Image: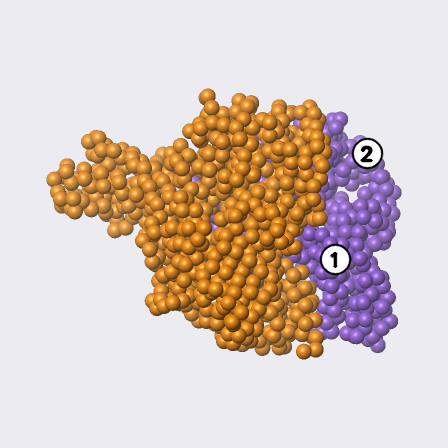
Amino acid sequence: MAETKTRNEIRFILNGADVALTDIAPDATLLDWLRLDRSLRGTKEGCAEGDCGACTVLVGKLSAEGLVYESVNACIRFMGSLDGTHVVTVEHLRGDGEKLHPVQQAVVDFHGSQCGFCTPGFVMSLYALWMKTPNPSDAAIEKALQGNLCRCTGYEAIMRAARAISSYGKAAKDPLAVERNDIAARLEALRDGARVEVGSAKQRLIVPADVDDFAAALEKEPGATIVAGSTDVGLWVTKHMRDISPAIFIGGLDGLRTMSEADGVITIGAGVTYSEAFETLSKRIPALGPLVDRIGGEQVRNMGTIGGNVANGSPIGDTPPPLIALGAQLTLRKGKARRTIPLETFFIAYGKQDRQPGEFVEAVHVPVPAKGTSFAVYKVTKRRDEDITATLGAFHLTLAKDGTVADIRIAYGGMAPTPKRATAVEKALIGKTWSEATVEAAMAEYASDFTPLTDMRATAEYRAMAARNLLLRFYVETTGTKAPFQVSRNEAA
Amino acid sequence: MNKHATPNLKAEKIVGGVATEQRHDSAHKHVSGTAVYIDDMPEPAGTLHVGLGLSKVAHGTLKSVDLSAVRSAPGVVDVLTHADVPGANDISPSNMHDDPVLAEGKVEFYGQPIFAVVANTREEARRAARLAKIEYDELPAVIDIWDLDPVKDKQVTTPLILKRGDAAAAIAAAPRRVKNRMWLGGQDHFYLEGQVSLAVPGEDDEVIVYCSTQGPSETQHLVAHALGVPSHAVTVEVRRMGGGFGGKETQANQCAAIAAIAAKKLKRAVKIRLDRDEDMTATGKRHDFAIDYEVGFDDEGNILGVDFTYALRCGYSADLSGPVGDRALFHCDNAYFYPAVHAKSVPLYTNTVSNTAFRGFGGPQGMVGAERVIDEVAFAVGKDPLEIRKLNFYDPMDAIGERCFTPYHQRVEDNIIHRIVAELEESCNYARRRREISAFNNNSRFIKRGLAMTPVKFGISFTKTEANQAGALVHVYADGSVHMNHGGTEMGQGLHLKVAQVVAEEFQIDLDRVKITATTTAKVPNTSPTAASSGADLNGMAAQNAARQIRKRLTDFAAEKYQVPLDQVVFLPNRVRVGNQEVAFNDLVKQAYISRIQLSAAGFYKTPKIHWDRSKGRGHAFYYYAYGAACSEVSVDTLTGEYVVERTDILHDAGRSLNQAIDLGQVEGGFIQGMGWLTTEELWWDDSGRLRTHAPSTYKIPLASDRPKIFNVKLTDWSSAYEPTIHRSKAVGEPPLPHGMSVLHALSDAVASVADHKICPRLDAPATPERVLMAIERLRREAAKPA
């Protein structure tokens, strides 16, 4: 094996300028760096946890589709993760001559700003949307803005502006579109295949050259913090001031950013973001599309990974319950050794997963539900979008020809210290006729499967009741009637 | 480069006068990130940063405070405690002396600031603040108010009682009666820009504090008080805030005082910017209320007598809780006439953060109580709540009879709620949709729809009479350009723009000739906080007064110079007609300057007519009322309590709006904020008294996707303030917020459908999916009970 080169600086493009940093801490955030080191103060801090979008900037990265610009939260984005990217802040937006950019002018003309503090973030989110979708539907605009909070306008004026952007200019003539090839070439030139190591002693970061290099680095330093999307690790730093050194940034590793399907099983590399997984998942397992759309805001989905959501082990992560219900498997790797386990066995107890020191989650394998089976997932939250689960239920039903339940896998989040199967409920259903009477009898079994807690998201009573009722919802949805059984923001086409 | 167009000397109208739609003066800076907020200002060399040390218990005495590790942490320059406060350790805005800058001897809520670390960087300050070793002797803590006794338990200030007629007798004699209680949660402001101050020390005892504050004068006075210097030593300046909503009326003062104390002590510029969690933990919010009500009514649904007790969670100190409770009582009638009424406030002490002003200032809470009473009556007599609402309205302004007296004995003289409700009922097809929803619900097992229309009548004026004054400073420079300053602050509401429109109108010059400048106590003294929706009413008048003084001097000058009678001097767009000739405004100004005419004026205004005797509960508390109505439709999932707002229609009265675009934004934004308050925004304290919803991850304000799917908002195009307000416009900051009640009541209506609209859902707020589901379950249980 050829020896990996090592480089001691982070290199990326900021707006128009090349940047090389040899002295940057593993926990330095893009937001602080922009505001404090570069005096670029158009990007604001509203929450420092990726929930308000005031700090939204674009990060352009090379991917299979070429150079893609995505909105991200600068407040929880670490500098180490920017190697080889193009960072675009609000200061970079410009129109013809002295004019404002079309996105900016639309927001001005439609009175889309009041206090103005959230506005640069909205402008950047709308900019990212407009580049991809110049004439978006209201649903697409709302989705793009799920991660942006405005407390003044009530959003209506921003929506009016967003609908009108294309009447102010053409996305194809936007500077980022015009300069795309140039920027892509500059980013390509930054890819030297080297491992990046910056800092020393207590402040150290590593960007591995590739997955093998990552495996080797982690094996050598099993105590290192693995950072993929940093949508959780970011808060360890901004909220809890935890020390994450040495940090290994894996979000840019192509080898972890692959998705493939073979024999009815989709394999999702641990570095695949929610946004990257969305298209395949929503096509192959349609129930997962609307779920992914309700995880975080667009910025978080552009950063956060399914692998991270699993590896993190949180009882309120949204992907483990449906993946468990689907019978997903997990590949863990340490050095060159790999093992594959059923996902549900990965979650041992609160804060404890079946991951050895030096080991990492490499991929998740998700079986596509067989034809004739039913699969659904329901997330219950206080606020519909960009909220953390109170209870989330996933159901995967196989009916026998005689109308009895041949198999059912039910898994929940928010109901126990880990994502957890409802085995007693399953048992009460299997072999029985799939009828409302059977379902009602099984609903009594929730009490033996779950003893949920009361916290700021919901009381134990509510969690128990809503969780039970989700089974009834699943039942009626599988009985084929056309009546609506859920409230929805966007009517089915 | 001069970007300003040459004034058009032939124009028929100026660009940007009053009653025109103008874009926010800073909009182009907002979108490009060039609008400067306090944290964006270039820091003076050597600026230090503050991190706060907060209490970890809800109530206790400070047994020992060991800050040695804090002091020796990297980058730390100093650590301040109450002992470092050179003047009074007191920033109570209500003269109650119950709000220390830094805790002294005891702490009274989880999150109370105990010490302030000053370090070279903000990160160093924050890190160091965590190293303190503090021991407490814990005392029993009172967190919730639900079980408190309105008579025996501790109160932070004097309650108010309003009464007219003999409510107890009227209720006792009424054919029907209902008595119950409701819970109404508080609300965090969630301004996107958190609390921030930058203090720059000057010579002698001087200090300039750049502070994100709605009340620069009060910040100035309290900083001076804490520094132990006269107010003249302290200058407070703010160009704009990233949102305020009442949360920076008094809550900015603590940060300002800490920064100023540190800056004076260390002789360096000092900045403090709270992290979101600290901001939400350590600064006050909208008051939660427990509202007891008893109503007597007849079989038709006419209210005969009402008794209310509004208990409010004040937190550990008075702050503005007294007047907030007062305003709740002032709005316990909403738009309804009560033949007999008794209402009292109970401002309860709790070991939680001291609650404060929030858009509406108790008024919305008062109205929510009134609307619950309406609901109770409607369910009791089996009618659509809208019928009961209309039945009980105050007399309309064109047919005032006996039904015009408020619980505080003010005559309602400008009531236009009948017309507003009638127009909205028509335009939103209320009756047809009511039938359609009924049919839908009969055919839908799990999804239920609900519809409700709620009115708003909101009283405009500070109830603290002396606050109803304002000042402005206008300079006309020799080139004819104008510098405009006033005591109001800009927090996104477009106040500066509106006042500039007023000034442009007076001089008949284009709006871009009027320069908007930062609010500073050095230019206009003794100002009132920009609050109570009063910003444009007060400051617009004061600026108009200043402009008129200068215009008068210019008129006198022109008449004399050109030897024409005064009435032959007429201000036309960008020019002045003097006799038979027209002189460009700029030229006239230059001539006036050469002739040594004073081209600067201080303006002043005080609201006429108002008076209020709190001890008697009587007075003309409000100069006028603003009105509006909203109708919302929701879909509720009765399996989980989840819901969506299908449609909202609003018709709102801004009088003759100074700027319809700005006012529309206030109505839309106010509604969504009110909806958030009553639906998904839930403040949740754990048993130790620690607020656990202290960031957007846990505290859920509405998103774009929470807007009503159909959202029709209109301003009345026919209304005009009954009193001579600034160009007959009406205040528009707070009045739209309670339109959010229409969503609460639509949810209630959907819930009621599970028991055939026979049981009042008594849906408390915030009506989270959980509360909705629990209400559904209760109704199902009660409906299943044998009669």
- Residue B403: x and y in percent read 40, 67
- Name the residue tied to disc 2: A221
Please give the letter of the chain rendered in purple: A
Q: Quadrant of the N terminus of chain A?
A: top right
| Residue in view at x 51 percent, y 45 percent | B320
The secondary element bearing badge 2 is classed as loop
Q: Nearer the viewer, residue A361 or A427?
A: A427
Residue A67 in view:
no
Q: Where B426 sits versus B152, above or below?
A: below
Colour scheme of the rendered structure: by chain
Q: Nearer the viewer, residue B40 or B412?
A: B412
Q: Where A447 sits versus B85, above or below?
A: below
- Residue B132: x and y in percent read 70, 31
Nearest to N terminus: mark 1 or mark 2:
2
| Residue in view at x 57 percent, y 76 percent | B438
- Name the residue tied to disc 1: A460
Q: Nearer the viewer, residue A491 or B291?
A: B291
| Residue in view at x 76 percent, y 33 percent | A246
Looking at the rendered structure, whether the residues under marks 1 and 2 are on a common chain is answered as yes
Query: What's the mark number on residue B53?
Result: none
Quarter-wise, where is residue B419 in the image? bottom left
